[in-house]
Amino acid sequence: MKILVDTRDPGSVLHEFPVLWCFSDERPLKGLTGLLDWRLDTAISRLLMDGTLSGLWGEKVLMCGFDAALPEGFLLVGLGPMGEFDEEKIRKAGRLIARTVVNLKKHAACMALPGSGIPGFDTSTVAEHFLHGLILEARDTEFTPTFLCGVYNVDEALLGFQKTKVSLKAHLPADIIQVKS
């Protein structure tokens, strides 16, 4: 499996299928989800405020028709309350997102790590456990995730990804490639 880590501006890679996440108690939206919400004139926030979306664990919504730059739309996944997002839930989130993207017949997707942009989340731990779940779920597919990282957290993300690569090398060889801007 090939895992891409990209520090370029998110606008340069959103042509890939974006996978976004939100927590049920995260307001305002942060990270890549917040950026795309701003770009879409707060369409996601409005759906959360009127109760159409909740951010509860396991909620999956394929959203299309909001922006011509996103012809295939994007996937929004609910991760539940932030306080319950422990290592087990992080792995389950990786599996949930991988299973959903593969079921949508997508071979590539771009995403930020859950919790990025929110103080208190350890990027290395999230990267390690999220990728572990993702690899175990998508190991028999040709899925290539692109993780969008800021220059402020790319080293921590790479550390977490390398830990997963070493612990799972018997199950599935993974190439972690950092895309240079």
Image (tube, helix red, strand yellow):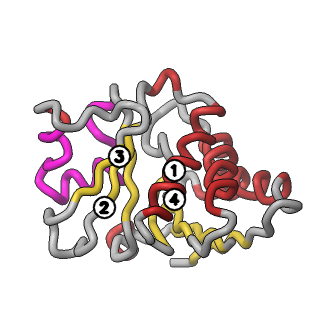
Mark 3–mark 2 distance (CA, rounded to whole Å): 10 Å
User: Which type of secondary structure does the marked residue at label 4 adopt?
Assistant: loop
Earlier along the polypeptide chain: callout 4 or callout 2? 2
Residue 140, horizontal then vertical, whole percent: 67, 68
At label 2, the amino acid type is Phe
The mark found on residue 60 in the picture is 3
Residue density around tag 4, few if under 14, some if 14–19, many if 20 or more, within 10 Å: many
Which of the two labelled residues, at mark 3 and mark 1, occupies the earlier sequence position? Answer: 3
Residue denoted by label 1: 113
Residue wearing tag 4: 149
The amino acid on which the numbered mark 1 sits, given as a three-letter code, is Leu
Q: Give the percent coordinates (x, y) of residue 160.
A: 71, 50
Measured in 3D between alpha carbons, the distance from the residue under mark 4 to the one under mark 3, in whole angstroms, is 23 Å
Percent position of residue 174, x then y: 75, 68
Question: Disc 4 or 3, which lies upstream in sequence?
Answer: 3
The amino acid at mark 3 is: Lys
Residue 61 versus residue 55: which sits nearer the camera?
Answer: 61
Q: Which mark identifies residue 133?
A: none
Residues marked 1 and 4 touching at CB (< 8 Å)? yes
Query: Where is 72 relative to 39, above or below?
Result: below
For the residues labelled 1 and 4, the Cα–Cα distance comes to 8 Å
Q: Estimate how packed mark 3 is, as few (under 14), some (14 to 19) or many (20 or more) residues with alpha carbons within 10 Å.
A: some
Cα–Cα gap, marks 3 and 1: 17 Å
Where residue 73 appears, x then y in whole percent?
26, 65
| Residue lying at 16% horizontally and 57% vertically, measured from the top left | 40
Q: Residue furthest top?
A: 83
Viewer-nearest of discs 3 and 2: 3
- At a point 76% along the width and 53% down the height, the residue shown is 164
Q: Residue at x 58, y 38 (%)?
A: 90
